[in-house]
Image (cartoon, rainbow, N blue to C red):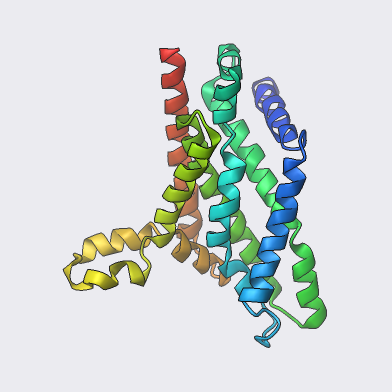
């Protein structure tokens, strides 16, 4: 078992280390912490609300992630294709799925690190009031799982694209559709014409609905299974795409 895990761990370390081989990683961490805190204080009126909670902070995450996470995932595969190193990677005696999972978990852990950099905001809230610790933990956990769903989609879009900008745009677009799915405003223009089964399906696909359910401190297994299913589906698609490109090379 240890021998079979060794290639995965080695590749994971390589991929995670890649984030810190350029200043972009530190810029990303700083920008994410600044934007999320700025959205909470300036737009969400965190202090003026008079409530000791991080609701304005977490409510912005689905939309903030649309800007920052595609930038994190866009180079997972497209950069390998651009530099030509993907041919070398895929000739190694390692399963494609191993590469896909290693790259994904490295990016997901890095996204978790970005969330850790926002903990001073939570510390400020504890200094000023007495927030519900369970809800705060749920918010961070929900944000991390939401980030995983974004990054799984980003991995697939990066595998499809040779250029990072294309991967960024595709990822942001697909994730936006998942965020808008199920929101009332989507159906307002012709709500009476939408069959209820279709509306139900759209609502069940909504990232925002499942995310907000978790951030309220309601730990429902179906919400976590939804995000896990999204990750499995898109990472499976990534594996298929990389295998097809490998076969056609």
Relative vertical location of residue 29 with respect to residue 190 in this rendering, above or below: above
Relative vertical location of residue 201 with respect to residue 166 in this rendering, above or below: below
Q: Is residue 213 left or right of residue 191?
A: right
When asked about the image quadrant of residue 183, the answer is bottom left
When asked about the image quadrant of residue 196, the answer is bottom left
Residue 68 x/y as whole percent: 60, 51
Q: In this rendering, does residue 101 appear at all?
A: yes
Identify the residue shown where x is 61% and y is 18%.
Answer: 85
Residue 203 x/y as whole percent: 35, 63
Relative vertical location of residue 207 with respect to residue 25 in this rendering, above or below: below
Q: Nearer the viewer, residue 240 or 70?
A: 70
Residue 77 x/y as whole percent: 55, 29
Q: In this rendering, does residue 135 appear at all?
A: no
Q: Is residue 68 left or right of residue 124?
A: left
Identify the residue shown where x is 64% and y is 69%.
Answer: 39
Identify the residue shown where x is 54% and y is 70%.
Answer: 218
Q: Nearer the viewer, residue 82 or 219?
A: 82
Name the quarter where the N terminus is drawn.
top right
When asked about the image quadrant of residue 138, the answer is bottom right
Q: How many marks?
A: 0
Residue 63 x/y as whole percent: 53, 61
Which residue is at the far right? 127
Name the quarter where the C terminus is drawn.
top left
């Amino acid at each position: 078992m240890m021998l079979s895990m060794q290639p995965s761990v080695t590749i994971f370390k390589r991929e995670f280390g890649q984030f810190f081989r350029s200043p972009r990683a530190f810029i990303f961490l700083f920008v994410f912490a600044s934007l999320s805190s700025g959205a909470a204080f300036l737009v969400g009126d965190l202090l003026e609300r008079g409530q000791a909670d991080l609701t304005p902070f977490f409510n912005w995450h689905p939309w903030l992630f649309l800007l920052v996470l595609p930038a994190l995932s866009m180079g997972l595969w497209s950069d390998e294709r651009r530099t030509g190193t993907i041919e070398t990677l895929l000739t190694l005696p390692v399963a494609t799925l191993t590469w896909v999972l290693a790259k994904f978990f490295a990016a997901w852990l890095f996204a978790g690190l970005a969330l850790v950099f926002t903990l001073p905001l939570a510390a400020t809230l504890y200094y000023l009031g007495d927030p519900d610790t369970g809800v705060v933990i749920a918010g961070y956990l929900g944000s991390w799982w939401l980030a995983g769903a974004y990054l799984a989609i980003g991995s697939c879009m990066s595998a499809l694209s040779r250029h990072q900008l294309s991967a960024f745009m595709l990822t942001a677009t697909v994730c936006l559709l998942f965020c808008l799915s199920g929101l009332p405003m989507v159906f307002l223009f012709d709500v009476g014409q939408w069959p209820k089964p279709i509306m139900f399906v759209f609502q069940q696909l909504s990232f925002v609905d499942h995310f907000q359910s978790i951030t309220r401190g309601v730990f429902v297994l179906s919400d976590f299974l939804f995000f896990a299913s999204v990750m499995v589906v898109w990472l499976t698609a990534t594996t298929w795409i990389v295998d097809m490109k490998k076969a056609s090379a």
